[in-house]
Image (cartoon, rainbow, N blue to C red):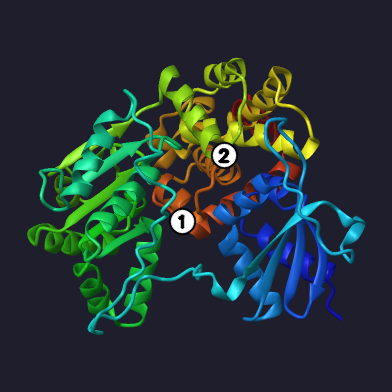
């Protein structure tokens, strides 16, 4: 017999497989299943802030998990436990019926899952249907209003605004936004798409990651529908492709994108791209494609300066309806400098800690949260950085590490680089293999198993693993 606990536990297993463990611990472990009636699951969350965060970031995942357990008629009811958490926000005081545990003061939010337009859709469809409506895949929460301007992003933001006001009609075509992790590339291109849709509702806008674009192409080849794939993308007015560096080494996908790009550009359609590096630094991208990336404007997003970081924090707090002292804002801005994602993540963690533990946001709490946050984020390293560290450790060039040679010490160094890339990055096995000597995913998988085995059987090899691990965790 189904119970609230059993249904929720099954949902949690699905959720845990699809998000990072820290996010799971923060946003799902505190939830309590309360009641199950027919296909209606009641869950209790600690605060309104908590509920809004789930709705904004995880509703698609919750929908899929709950529908899997209870069918298409599934409904989700949030029981929001109300507390005056921050000291400056009035609590909600609506009572819920006595059958809920403890008659906790709370607010009910009934979410009919079947009415939510959150289906994870594949935008590739066979063209030719009259009045075809294409899902833009845009996130309306990413807009120009909350993309704050500063010295580090002024050129990219201004160019993005110009493109969105006149798509295909500026010299910024294509517009390529590049920069490191968490600096706002995805936010900015979503803002461009959202602005285009607001100003030109008749235009077809599509946001897609390069990884998904590649998978769609592979599927179209398998199904012998390559021409349908090309025709579909040729009808897009504003095509936004995120993380275009993922096309590295994928000659078939690069070839088809080359033809799509040419068609769109020649017909006055707008192309917007993001990358983690400038075109000149991209590897294994065909020259004819790189030359087209350079036709328009390549704008870099850099690390935000102190003033911009303060503005970002204040804007985030204002949007969440939270007030904290200037001293705390100053402390967070001075201690988290790397990127916007980490900056917002730190303030969210601070608010969450305050909410869950019923603590006032003090400078001591801020120091505790920021210290832990900075310690964790320091472990996020790139594949390029891993190859550099491993090569230096074994006193060889990165080119030697990536080479085709089968010399034992070079093979082991290469396998260690793949092992640490899988451990410390979010990259797929295929992406790791592509960046470390153009290997396939099976080679990476074999490398990881080899490292695990040798760590148990070879004392010297185990020392290699221990020494390198320290370099990635300090």
* Residue found at the far left of this picture: 266
| One can see residue 248 in this view | no
Q: Position of residue 100 (x, y in %)?
A: 87, 63
Q: Position of residue 464 (x, y in %)?
A: 64, 32
Instruction: Decide: few, some or many residues near mark 1? Use Cα within 10 Å; few <14, some 14-19, many ≥20.
Output: some
Instruction: Decide: few, some or many residues near mark 2? Use Cα within 10 Å; few <14, some 14-19, many ≥20.
Output: some
Image quadrant occupied by the C terminus: top right
Instruction: State the residue at coordinates (25%, 80%).
Output: 131
First in sequence: mark 2 or mark 1? 2
Rendering quarter of residue 91: top right
Relative vertical location of residue 234 with respect to residue 419 in this rendering, above or below: below
Residue 430 circle label:
1
Relative vertical location of residue 16 with respect to residue 322 in this rendering, above or below: below
Residue 393 circle label:
none
Image quadrant occupied by the N terminus: bottom right
Residue under numbered circle 2: 320
Rendering quarter of residue 324: top right
Helix, strand or loop at disc 2? helix
Going by the image, does 43 lie left or right of 388? right
Instruction: State the residue at coordinates (42%, 18%).
Output: 307
How far apart are labels 2 and 1 at the CA level?
39 Å
Relative vertical location of residue 17 with respect to residue 404 in this rendering, above or below: below
Q: Position of residue 30 (x, y in %)?
A: 78, 50
| One can see residue 205 in this view | yes
């Amino acid at each position: 017999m189904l119970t609230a606990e059993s249904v929720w536990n099954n949902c949690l297993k699905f959720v845990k497989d699809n998000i990072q463990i820290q996010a799971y611990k923060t946003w799902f472990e505190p939830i309590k299943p309360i009641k199950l009636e027919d296909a209606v699951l009641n869950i209790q969350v600690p605060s309104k802030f908590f509920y809004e965060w789930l709705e904004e970031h995880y509703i698609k995942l919750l929908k899929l998990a709950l529908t899997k357990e209870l069918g298409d008629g599934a409904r989700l009811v949030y029981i929001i436990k109300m507390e005056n958490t921050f000291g400056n926000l009035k609590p909600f005081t609506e009572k819920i019926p006595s059958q809920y545990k403890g008659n906790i003061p709370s607010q009910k939010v009934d979410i009919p899952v079947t009415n939510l337009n959150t289906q994870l859709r594949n935008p590739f469809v066979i063209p030719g249907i009259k009045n075809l409506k294409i899902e833009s895949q845009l996130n309306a929460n990413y807009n120009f209003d909350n993309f704050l301007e500063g010295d580090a992003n002024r050129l990219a933001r201004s160019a993005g605004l110009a493109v969105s006001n006149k798509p295909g009609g500026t010299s910024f075509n294509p517009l390529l936004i590049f920069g490191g992790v968490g600096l706002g590339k995805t936010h900015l291109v979503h803002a461009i798409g959202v602005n285009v849709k607001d100003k030109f509702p008749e235009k077809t806008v599509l946001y897609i990651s390069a990884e998904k674009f590649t998978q769609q192409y592979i599927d179209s080849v398998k199904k012998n529908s390559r021409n349908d794939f090309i025709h579909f993308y040729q009808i897009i007015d504003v095509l936004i492709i995120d993380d275009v560096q993922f096309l590295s080494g994928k000659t078939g996908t690069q070839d088809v994108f080359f033809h799509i790009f040419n068609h769109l550009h020649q017909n006055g359609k707008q192309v917007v791209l993001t990358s983690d590096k400038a075109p000149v630094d991209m590897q294994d991208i065909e020259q004819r494609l790189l030359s087209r990336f350079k036709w328009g404007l390549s704008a870099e997003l850099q690390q935000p300066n102190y003033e911009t970081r303060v503005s970002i924090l204040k804007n985030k707090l204002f949007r969440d309806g939270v007030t904290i002292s200037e001293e705390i804002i100053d402390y967070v801005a001075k201690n988290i400098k790397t990127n916007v994602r980490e900056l917002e993540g730190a303030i969210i963690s601070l608010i969450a800690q305050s909410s869950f533990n019923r603590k006032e946001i003090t400078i001591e709490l801020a120091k505790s949260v920021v210290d832990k946050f900075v310690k964790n984020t320091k472990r996020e390293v790139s594949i390029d950085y891993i190859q550099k560290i491993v090569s230096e450790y074994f006193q060889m060039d990165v080119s030697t590490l990536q080479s085709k040679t089968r010399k034992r010490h070079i093979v082991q160094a290469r396998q260690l680089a793949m092992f640490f890339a899988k451990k410390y990055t979010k990259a797929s096995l295929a992406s790791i293999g592509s960046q470390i000597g153009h290997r396939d995913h099976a080679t990476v998988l074999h490398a990881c198993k080899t490292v695990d085995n040798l760590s148990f059987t070879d004392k010297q090899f185990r020392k290699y693993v221990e020494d390198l691990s320290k370099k990635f965790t300090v």
